[in-house]
Image: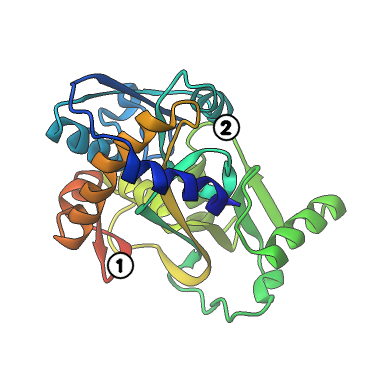
């Protein structure tokens, strides 16, 4: 479905003249740190926002970024009241316009306590565990998503849905204390929450958890408003090559390290 939106945009990139007049560019999104953060809470905007800001400033434009609830952010971009979203899976909003550069990979992985022998083996051996997930999340894995739906109906307690404030920190504390057996989520969010706990000395010494296997992957891309495709095409001309350059040059870690993380062999890791 995303392809149908991408084809006409590629044509526009060829046909539309490149405008250099400086302007303010508005991006909106929900906070999901470290990709996108609430500056009032963390002092930072998130590393994908930092990348987009530098790309625009290099071309003389100024990024204006603000956090909004996710559905409202989508509405603002869809209606042209905002220029774009900094990071989204294309399938989550196929009516928006997209470039081709991946600004952040997604890796949904199981995490268990460091002393656990369990590891995801590619089958449905997750039924052996009490697993915590963020309420409302799906994982781009039909079998596991169906398992979550079935377990929720039967109320067996094998899947615990977490919501409210600081859900990742709470899931980690539940796992470390033995109240659950595993966490499933994108590794970048787990590592960021773990980094936060280390900074506040909530945990000490050796890492108390480990990655127990990858369930599924995804690709976060920058999304643009379909209301003004010429303007979106101009932004893609600016942002897409900058993202590629950041990754190809290895400078991506300059953006990620302030958040306590780094990329090693294409995977997010915690800086220790």
Q: Nearer the viewer, mark 1 or mark 2?
A: 1
98 vs 23, left or right, is right
The percent position of residue 173, horizontal first and vertical second, equals 48, 49
Any part of residue 86 in sight: yes
x 76%, y 60%: residue: 146
The residue carrying mark 1 is 266
The residue carrying mark 2 is 164
Q: Label 1, label 2: how many angstroms apart (C-alpha)?
A: 31 Å
126 vs 155, left or right, is left
Of residue 57 and residue 178, the one placed in the foreground of this image is 57
The percent position of residue 175, horizontal first and vertical second, equals 52, 56
Mark toward the start of the polypeptide (1 vs 2): 2
x 69%, y 72%: residue: 128
x 50%, y 32%: residue: 226
Q: Counting other residues with Cα less than 10 Å from the Cα at mark 1, is it few (<14), some (14-19), or many (20 or more)?
A: few
The quadrant where residue 36 appears: top left
Any part of residue 158 in sight: no
């Amino acid at each position: 479905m995303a392809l149908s939106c991408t084809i006409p945009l590629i044509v526009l990139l060829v046909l539309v003249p490149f405008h250099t007049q400086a302007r303010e560019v508005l991006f909106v999104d929900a906070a999901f740190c470290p990709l996108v953060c609430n500056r009032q809470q963390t002092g930072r905007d998130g590393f994908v926002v930092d990348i987009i800001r530098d790309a625009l400033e290099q071309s003389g434009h100024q990024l204006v970024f603000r956090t909004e609830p996710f559905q409202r952010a989508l509405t603002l971009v869809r209606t042209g009241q905002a220029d774009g979203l900094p990071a989204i899976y294309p399938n989550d909003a196929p009516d928006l316009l997209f470039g081709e550069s991946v600004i952040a990979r997604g890796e949904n992985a199981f995490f268990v306590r460091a002393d656990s022998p369990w590891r995801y083996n590619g089958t449905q051996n997750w039924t052996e565990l009490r697993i915590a997930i963020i309420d409302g999340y799906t994982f781009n894995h039909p079998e596991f998503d169906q398992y979550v739906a079935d377990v929720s109906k039967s109320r067996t307690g094998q899947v615990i849905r977490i919501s409210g404030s600081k859900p990742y920190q709470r899931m980690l504390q539940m796992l470390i204390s033995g109240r659950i057996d595993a966490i499933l989520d994108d590794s970048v969010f787990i590592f960021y929450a773990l980094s936060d706990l280390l900074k506040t000395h909530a945990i000490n010494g050796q890492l108390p958890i480990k990655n127990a296997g990858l369930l599924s992957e995804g690709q976060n891309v920058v999304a643009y408003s379909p209301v003004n495709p010429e303007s979106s095409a101009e932004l893609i001309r600016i942002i897409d090559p900058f993202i590629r350059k950041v990754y190809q040059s290895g400078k991506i870690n300059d953006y990620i390290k302030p958040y306590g993380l780094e990329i090693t062999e294409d995977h997010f890791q915690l800086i220790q």
